[in-house]
Image (cartoon, rainbow, N blue to C red):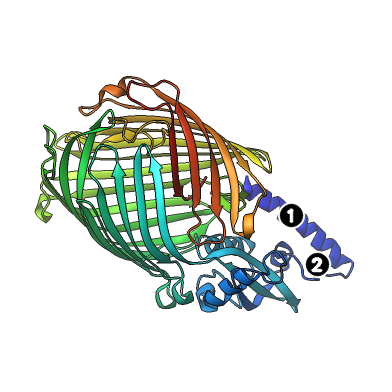
Amino acid sequence: MLTLTRRLSAFLAALVWTADMAMGQEPTQSGGVPSLVELELAGATIGEIRIDNQNIFDLSDRKENNALFSLANRLHIRTRPEVIRNQLLFKSGELLSVRVIEETERLLRANSYLYDVKILPYAWHDGVVDIKVSTRDTWTFSPSGSLSRQGGVNKAGLGFKEANLLGTGMRFSIATRGTVGGDGPAKNGAELQLNYPNVLGSRATINYTKATFGDNSSQSLSAIRPFYALDTRWAAGASAGNSDSVISSYANGNLTSQYRRNQDRAEAWGGWSEGLVDGWAHRYSGGVAYDNAAYSAGPALAPPAQLAPDRTLVGPFLRYEGIQDDFRKLTNRDQIGRPEYFSLGWRSTLQFGRVLVGLGSTQNASLYSGSLSKGLGVSADSTLLVATALSGEYANGRGDRQLLSGSARYYLRQDSGSVFFASVAGDRAKYSDGTQLFAIGGDTGLRGYPASYQTGDRRVIFTSEQRFYTDWYPFQLFRVGGAVFYDMGRVWSGPYQNAASDRWLHNAGFGARILSARSSTGTTLHFDFAFPLKRDPGTRSFLFSFHSKTGF
């Protein structure tokens, strides 16, 4: 639909441009410069590219011209112009392409350290157009203090994060956190994260994470040169990591058994693509993967009756990814007052691997995974996003470790200040060793019930929300909204389902949403009151939760 609209717009612009030229006039937009569509049709060549890297607050705006915002601008180190320039998908001397400029804006807006992005022509002469890329920063240094309550579990954390270290785009964070509540003991931990995109002006990214939390710990390192744009021709990457986790089983929200899983993983791969051809990007990758998992008794409670056997998987894999170029720019859907990009085209991935005893695996097996998603512009004001995924393995004449999931999300814009949202999601697991369980409760979608209230290997959850987006913009820092919601869901089946799993759960409630608009965190604070519509003995008549997450 978006592609058709774009072509129609180009056709109409061509008619206008032809008429103007016939009358000896140059077609113009505001300021005497032709629009991007008209410039593309005229075969314009890109000349100078000017980077206008603006600070956090616009002091020429009387609403933002105050001592506090002026101080924030002085303390903040602006994004370096070369950091912006290195992410552009177009260069001086190339023919102007509206599609490439739109994709560049979309990719730049994905950076949390940028609040706004505009790419516009500012001069037009002798078939050459000069382009200005204007960006506005967010506040990127955040002493972090978090406090939340979901499903009867209290969580707190302290630390700091910098999302644009010295204006280089590098992200660094360190934090401590703790959990109190539920039926388990108090837990404490710390986390360190480092992300360096566009290393030394390249397209490569380095990520490092180290975390501990109670009896759990993890560490990972990756270096990737991704398919960063639709027309990217090659990609490569390598990663390695270790995790030591305590896996818990629950019954009616109560902890019943535990076991420990220590897992080492590594992967190296390379990929190739012809780029964007006829509105599609087809990508092909191949590599080698290593996965070793060892299981043992947990630190406190006895393990389940069936403890998974240790196993090692080593072997090559092939991967395919297909992406259709069809994106829609919307506002007031999952964010408040911020542009969002919805992919309405087809997107698919397919991976097949073979692990072999001769390479060190504990068995010969075929591993497979795939996903498929599509967005539909049902009408001018409604959007439907659907997705499904499947993974598993086949060995000794039977399938195992199979996971099937699907989801649908629907948005209906009623006016500029309200949207009706509905979603449904389902999951089905088939693991003979019982290592894949689903849970549902106050921390996983059913806001009126305790955490992990139901467990099993099948899950369905439905949510509907009437969302409200206000124009209230307190201190030019926060966007405010609210919601009235209804949740319904159930988890059941499998050896670890509990007594609460014999029925569907329902709750209704209301809440407030506060988006931190000028911070690089881009998180939304959620304050919700949820009321279970049918209570079991011992459950509360309502639950109050507050937490932060990305999205409405």
Q: CA distance from mark 1 to mark 2?
A: 16 Å
Identify the amino acid type marked 1: Phe
Secondary structure beneath dot 2 equals loop
From this view, report whether residue 495 is shown above or below residue 66: above
Name the foreground residue: 333 vs 147: 147
- Asked if labels 2 and 1 touch by Cβ distance under 8 angstroms, the answer is no
Instruction: Judge whether residue 181 can be spotted in this image.
Output: yes
Q: Viewer-proximal residue, 140 or 237?
A: 140
Measuring 41% from the left and 32% from the top, which residue is drawn there? 446
Residue 495, given in percent of the width and then of the height, sits at 20, 27
Q: Closer to the camera, 91 or 466? A: 466
- The quadrant where residue 24 appears: bottom right
Residue visible at 25% across and 37% down? 183
Q: Locate residue 249, reporting x and y percent.
A: 22, 35
Answer with mark 1 or mark 2, whichever residue precedes in sequence.
1
Residue labelled with disc 1: 11
Vertical arrangement, residue 505 with respect to residue 393, above or below: above
Residue in view at x 62 percent, y 38 percent: 419
Q: Quadrant of the N terminus?
A: top right
Task: Name the mark on residue 28.
Answer: 2
Q: Nearer the viewer, mark 1 or mark 2?
A: 2
